[in-house]
Amino acid sequence: MNHQHQQLITLIQDGLPLVPRPYLAIAEQLGTTETEVISSIQSLLHSGLMKRLGIVVRHRQLGYRANAMVVWDIPDHQVTQLGQQFKQFDFVTLCYRRKRHLPQWPYNLFCMIHSQEQDTVLQKLQTMIEVCQLQQIPHQVLFSKRCFKQCGARY
Amino acid sequence: MTTATSSPPTFTELQKKLLNDFQRNFPLSPTPYAEIATQLGVSEEVVIQMLREWSDQGIIGRVGPVFPPNRIGCSTLVAMSVPPARLEEIANYINTFAEVNHNYEREHPFNLWFVLTAATPVRLQTVLEEIEEVTGFPVMSLPLLEDYHIDLAFKLPF
């Protein structure tokens, strides 16, 4: 990533200005052109450095009250394959492999399930267990209670 | 701070479309809001005004980019087990770090979970050590090894 991209990210990470020509407003701050800003964003998206650009909704305000982090202790040789398999469930919004922290934390696969109610989260979890045959895999469900902070990452 | 007890707002069909359809593929034309307005059959002012209101109300976090973790800078998920009576105070202290972007209480003996993102691993380590030192409780850092599916675009429950 070049310096220009870095500056652009700093300017847009909290959001595009809500004005008719947002890219022009950013260009003026960067001392560049509107076309240049648009093509830089295109290239960040294209390279995968930016995952997406758009409206970032705050799920808790929109009725997704039950947010569960489900953690699994998967044998290392199976974890990548299962992580890929979890993608098929549209209710899984995030899925990562993380380092275990033994002995107190044996779990290495994390996924998030969002739903309106805790019961529906648990039903969805049951579907995952059956479809992926995870009956023997130790797991825990950590429902969220209070949200103390939710914002985009800052760089 | 937001709680899980407030009732969700209700939206018109137009508002639902605006919320659902532009979480990705946001127009990269000089006048993106006008382009959205055309698709929705309303004026540019209506779109901008609605987004401003939702932004003020905290319904949307921003109209902007989502970055995958560990591509720019580095991040880790951190868990702590703290006495419930001190949870809020400790959570508020942790939020004072700009490096913290998500911070949740969860129903588990590890009752506080937050994501730390920093420009360098050294800075990440410094923040972790400072949190341990100030709060007096150990942190459990669970760095990301592989990302299978990170897409915070929500299909809204309408």
Image (cartoon, helix red, strand yellow):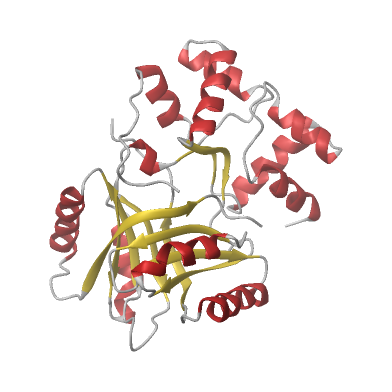
Residue B136 x/y as whole percent: 50, 81
At which x and y percent is residue A17? 67, 31
B129 is higher (above) or lower (below) than A72:
below
Position of residue A151 in the picture relative to residue A142 (left or right): right
Number of marks in the rendered image = 0
Q: Is residue A49 above or below residue B125?
A: above
Picture quadrant of residue B65: top right
Of B81 and A121, nearer the camera is B81
Residue at (41%, 53%) from the top-left corner? A147
Is residue A4 visible in this depiction of the protein? Answer: yes
Comparing B113 with B134, the one in front is B134
Residue at the image point whose x is 28% and y is 81% from the top: A75
**What residue appears at the point 34 percent right and 81 percent down from the top-left corner?**
A105
- The structure residue drawn at horizontal position 82% and vertical position 37%, both measured from the top left corner, is A29
Residue B88, image x, y percentages: 43, 61
| Residue A90 seen from this side | no
Would you identify the image quadrant in which residue A145 lies?
bottom left
Q: Quadrant of residue A86?
A: bottom left
